[in-house]
Image: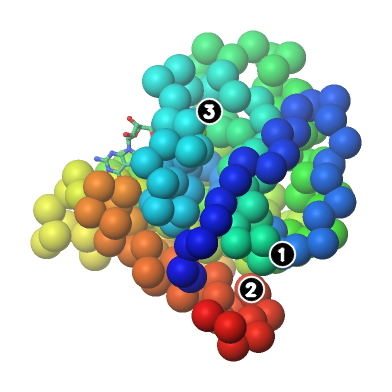
């Protein structure tokens, strides 16, 4: 994707009405601090449009980034932050469910998992949830630059086993520092989830 213009178009909180977009949406889910905002910035070629937060768990909003007026990248609120209250967890769940259930334009959900660590129970729940809502999860193994190249296959296997991936679920290692994996993600989005008219 050649990025011509991007903008944060809609911020949706727990009480907001979801936007009725008429363009495809690709969403990004994962634990807070896993690198969602960094990935979205990398995909948009922007340094900090999607805020990279130092206080994970604070943003209980769904952010819609308009890409070239042809599609949206959707930043979902993160989970698994210890200091979040029970009430906030319930609100988080309702917001995510409202979106996964209610969006007419959602085409795919990418689930981000830190390549260094065993997936958590929350990661497994999120993976199943995406599947159960009828979407194809694609796993992005983030922070690839933090492990040695020789360890990548071992860690990818750890993610596959830990999440009990169903056949067909792709795993794409990615680093927002080196941008490794960026082109592969755009390639997948463009070939699988956008009806391109041959313009790009
Ligand atoms: N080394 C490294 N750090 C990363 C990478 N992606 C994100 N980070 C760092 O991880 C922290 C959380 O990133 P952020 O994008 O805000 O995560 P989010 O909470 O999922 O949106 C920040 O300090 C980022 O700089 C990566 O690929 N490599
Ligand atoms: Mg973020």
- Residue picked out by circle 2: 193
Residue at 40% over, 53% down = 45
Say if 53 sits above or below 28 in the image: above
Which of the 4 quarters of the picture holds residue 199? bottom right
- Residue picked out by circle 1: 24
Label 2 beta carbon less than 8 Å to ligand 1: no
Residue at 78% over, 45% down = 99
SS assignment at label 3: loop
Residue 153, percent across and down?
A: 24, 65
Q: Pointer 2: residues within 10 angstroms few (<14), some, or many (20+)?
A: some
Numbered mark located on residue 80 in the image: 3
Nearest the camera: 117 or 184?
Answer: 184
**Labels 2 and 1: the sequence-earlier one:** 1
Marks 2 and 1, how far apart in space? 8 Å
- Residue 17 visible in this rendered orientation of the protein: yes
**Labels 1 and 3: the sequence-earlier one:** 1
From the viewer's perspective, is 130 left or right of 191?
Answer: right
Nearest the camera: 120 or 33?
Answer: 33
SS assignment at label 1: loop
Residue 164, percent across and down?
A: 50, 59
């Amino acid at each position: 994707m050649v990025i011509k213009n991007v903008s944060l178009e809609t911020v949706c909180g727990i009480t907001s009405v979801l936007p009725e977009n008429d363009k495809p949406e690709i969403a990004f889910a994962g634990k807070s601090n896993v690198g969602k905002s960094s990935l979205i910035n990398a995909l948009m070629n922007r340094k900090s449009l999607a805020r990279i937060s130092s206080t994970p768990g604070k943003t209980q909003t769904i952010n819609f980034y308009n890409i070239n007026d042809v599609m949206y990248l959707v930043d979902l609120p993160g989970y698994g932050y210890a200091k979040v209250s029970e009430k906030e967890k319930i609100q988080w769940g309702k917001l995510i469910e409202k979106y996964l259930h209610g969006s007419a334009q959602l085409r795919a959900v990418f689930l981000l998992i830190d390549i260094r660590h065993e997936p958590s129970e929350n990661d497994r729940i999120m993976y199943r949830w995406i599947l159960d809502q009828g979407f194809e999860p694609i796993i992005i193994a983030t922070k690839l630059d933090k492990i040695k190249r020789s360890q990548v296959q071992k860690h990818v296997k750890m993610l596959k086993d830990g999440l009990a991936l169903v056949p067909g679920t792709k795993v794409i290692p990615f680093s927002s520092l080196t941008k490794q994996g960026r082109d592969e993600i755009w390639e997948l989005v463009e070939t699988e989830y956008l009806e391109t008219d041959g313009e790009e």
